[in-house]
Image (cartoon, rainbow, N blue to C red):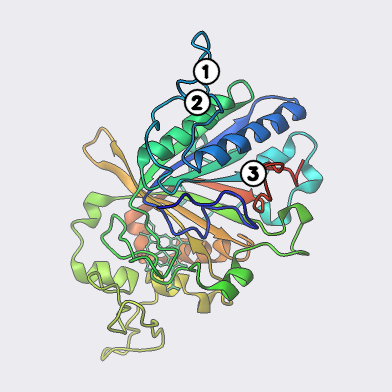
């Protein structure tokens, strides 16, 4: 398939139909010189423009340069196609405490509040800058992040990174809905690239929302959510379906027959109780409970091996894009944290919030140009 265009009004990797693989990295800026950071952002942009089109990170490439110098590409993607690679950048709240940027920090980028049940590990949370690499080939996604980290040596340090597979959301109606590691279809009621009106309302920051440098941008919330897989696997099917309020096979709401039937939240069963339970995930996350608020989910499954106690270290690397996390993600997560019956089987272990600037016009433009 053709490479995903790098330039455009919005960054690629957001409404781009979700690729199969993820390599996400959060970095901290270590240089105290603003000019060095800007220079790095320019180098990154040039490398990203090349790699997303299936080329080497640098102009000489893995094997075309001076044999006495380290190559300007690490080489493991030689011969591989672009594989749908997208690279998407975001700036975290902590960046704005550096380089006297405090007055440019959008209020939508305020730190997330603490939620009941949070078990966040600081070392794998936050970050000054994030870069999301998505591709159909894991080698291509890893190659991209590795080369950007290499370019950043001495100016930024990797804080944490995460590999993901089996996208857990469809972001286009042309895609079949994939399944998460609990075995359920995930992404059925997601915002999709075809929903142009809703994307304008719920996804992209508009003029007047905040500082002008974010016009056409969007905000990313990341949550690494570990699943207690072994406990889940011992839960009866009927309980699993009640937790989500959906059928496991087809993905239909418990009040409907087909995957895309609207859940009927008012319907009661013969026992007088709601068919889609009060503490079910789909009810608590439903836009009708949150003044119509929607998010674009773009998460990935992860398995980081096992944890030394024989349990899979696995779950969902949740990522959601939206116009204002404090009006979208936060109220939804507050409702879920308070009483979602899924909570017995999950634990939020990392958290991040990032401002993702608008897209780049052309080769003269660079990541963060509107901010610095
Ligand atoms: C819906 C799984 C965490 C927001 C769903 C669905 C599943 C699911 C299976 C139904 C199908 C669909 O519409 O996609 C999970 C799992 C999670 C998780 C396994 C954690 C491990 C979250 C979090 C949020 C969230 C943290 C946001 C705070 C939503 C929303 C919907 C949804 C907005 C659509 C509700 C609707 O309009 O019907 N999720 N989810 N989910 N989830 Fe989650």
Q: Does label 2 or label 3 sit earlier along the sequence? A: 2
Residue displayed at 41% across by 46% down: 135
* The C terminus sits in image quarter: top right
The residue pinned by badge 3 equals 91
**Residue closest to the eye, 228 or 15:** 15
Marker disc for residue 339: none
Q: Is residue 211 visible?
A: no
CB at disc 3 and ligand 1 closer than 8 Å: no
The residue pinned by badge 1 equals 65
Disc 2 is placed on an element classified as: loop
Quadrant of ligand 1 in image? bottom left
Left or right of 334, for residue 200: right
The residue pinned by badge 2 equals 61
Residue 300 appears at what percent x and percent y?
A: 39, 51
Residue displayed at 72% across by 26% down: 36
**Discs 1, 2 touching: Cβ within 8 Å:** yes
Q: Residues within 10 Å of mark 3 (few under 14, many from 20)?
A: many
Residue 147 appears at what percent x and percent y?
A: 50, 29
Left or right of 214, for residue 146: left
Closer to the eye: label 2 or 3: 2
Vertical placement of 314 versus 328: above or below? above
């Amino acid at each position: 398939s053709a490479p995903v265009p790098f330039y455009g009004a919005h960054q690629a990797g957001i409404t781009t139909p979700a690729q199969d693989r993820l390599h996400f990295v959060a970095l901290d800026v270590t240089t105290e010189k603003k000019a060095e950071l800007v220079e790095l952002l320019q180098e990154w942009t040039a490398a990203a423009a090349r790699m997303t089109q299936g080329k080497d990170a640098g102009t000489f490439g893995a094997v075309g340069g001076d044999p006495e110098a380290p190559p300007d590409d690490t080489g493991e993607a030689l011969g591989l196609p672009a594989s749908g690679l997208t690279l998407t950048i975001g700036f975290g709240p902590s960046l704005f405490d550096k380089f006297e940027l405090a007055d440019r920090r959008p209020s939508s980028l305020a730190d997330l509040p603490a939620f009941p049940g949070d078990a966040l590990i600081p070392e794998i949370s936050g970050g000054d800058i994030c870069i999301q690499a998505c591709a159909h080939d894991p080698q291509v996604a890893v190659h991209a992040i590795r080369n950007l980290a290499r370019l950043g040596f001495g100016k930024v340090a990797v804080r944490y990174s995460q590999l993901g597979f089996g996208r857990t959301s469809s972001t286009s109606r042309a895609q079949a809905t994939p399944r998460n590691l609990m075995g359920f279809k995930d992404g059925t009621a997601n915002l999709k690239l075809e929903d142009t009106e809703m994307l304008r309302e719920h996804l992209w920051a508009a003029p007047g929302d905040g500082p002008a440098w974010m016009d056409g941008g969007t905000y990313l919330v990341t949550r690494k959510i570990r699943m207690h897989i072994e406990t889940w696997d011992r839960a009866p099917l009927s309980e699993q379906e009640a937790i989500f309020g959906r059928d496991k096979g087809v993905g239909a709401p418990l009040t409907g027959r087909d995957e895309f039937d609207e859940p009927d939240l008012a319907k009661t069963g013969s026992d007088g109780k709601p068919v889609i339970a009060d503490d079910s995930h789909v009810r608590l996350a439903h836009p009708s409970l949150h003044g119509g608020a929607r998010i674009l989910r773009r998460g990935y499954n992860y398995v980081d091996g096992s944890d030394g106690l024989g349990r899979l270290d696995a779950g969902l690397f949740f990522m959601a894009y939206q116009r204002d996390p404090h009006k979208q993600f936060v109220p939804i997560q507050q409702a879920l944290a308070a009483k979602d019956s899924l909570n017995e089987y999950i634990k939020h272990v990392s958290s991040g919030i990032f401002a993702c600037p608008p897209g780049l016009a052309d080769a003269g433009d660079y990541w963060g140009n509107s901010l610095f």
